[in-house]
Image (cartoon, rainbow, N blue to C red):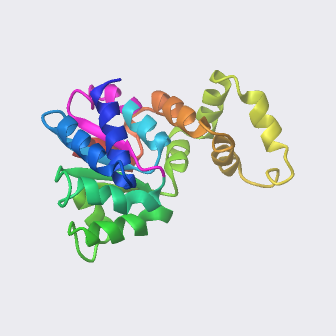
Amino acid sequence: MDEMRRFRLALAAWAAGGTGAGTAAAAARELADGTVRSIVLVEGSSDQAALETLAPRYGRDLGAEGVAVVPLGGATNIGRFLDVCGPAGLGLPLAGLCDIGEERYFRRHLERVGLGSGLTRAGLETLGFHVCVADLEDELIRALGTEGVRQVIEAQGETRPFRTFQNQPAQRVRPVEHQLRRFMGTHSGRKALYARALAEHLDLARVPRPLERLLTRV
């Protein structure tokens, strides 16, 4: 297991609290020392997959550069991770990515730990935290276009399952963009699969602003 993965696991255990938190904190501090330069807090594994797929296309190796992309397991966990990563914890430079619907959680807890006051969207970006509208999948679909996304689905061998999904009564009247977003979330692991696949096929001139700005920041 590489050091960045061990660091992420230790950080998650520390943030979770409980009887093992002290041991996890010591492990995270030890692993961070000399290895981790900054931490990027993202909602889930699909965000991590997109960033770690895009970075090499910009000639970046985030792990080698000491940038740890840490999935929170849900936006509501941001407070616990800021407690262990922020000024009262590791004190490392932070950045992040969230959906527009979860922006309030990030704003509230960044202010709580002393990283801002009266934060606006622009204020969040100044801190290195960027917001997807409406979510990561929506950003990637708009950037690639529906026909481009269909081609990616075909390359994954999932054209038939997607057509079956489109024919469900609840989906028939919805726009194709909505169908594509919903399809990507229909079973565990599919969001991360398509985050990676769509990021691989993006024209670098059309990378969604939140992803491009975040990678520029770190």
Q: Position of residue 90 (x, y in %)?
A: 19, 51
Asked whether the viewer can see residue 101, the reply is: yes
Relative depth, front residue between 207 and 162: 162
Q: Is residue 70 magenta?
A: yes
**Extreme-left residue of the structure:** 34
As drawn, 36 above or below 151: below
Query: Residue at 51% of width from left, 42% of height from top?
Result: 140
Horizontal relation, residue 190 to residue 98: left or right: right
As drawn, 140 above or below 152: below
Horizontal relation, residue 183 to residue 83: left or right: right
Give the residues drawn in magenta, as a range.
53-73
For the C terminus, give its image quadrant: top left
For the N terminus, give its image quadrant: top left
Horizontal relation, residue 217 to residue 11: left or right: left
Relative depth, front residue between 86 and 58: 86
**Extreme-bottom residue of the structure:** 118
Query: Residue at 49% of width from left, 28% of height from top?
Result: 201
Asked whether the viewer can see residue 36, the reply is: no
Query: Residue at 64% of width from left, 45% of height from top?
Result: 185
Q: Is residue 132 magenta?
A: no
Relative depth, front residue between 87 and 21: 21
Q: Position of residue 101 (x, y in %)?
A: 50, 64
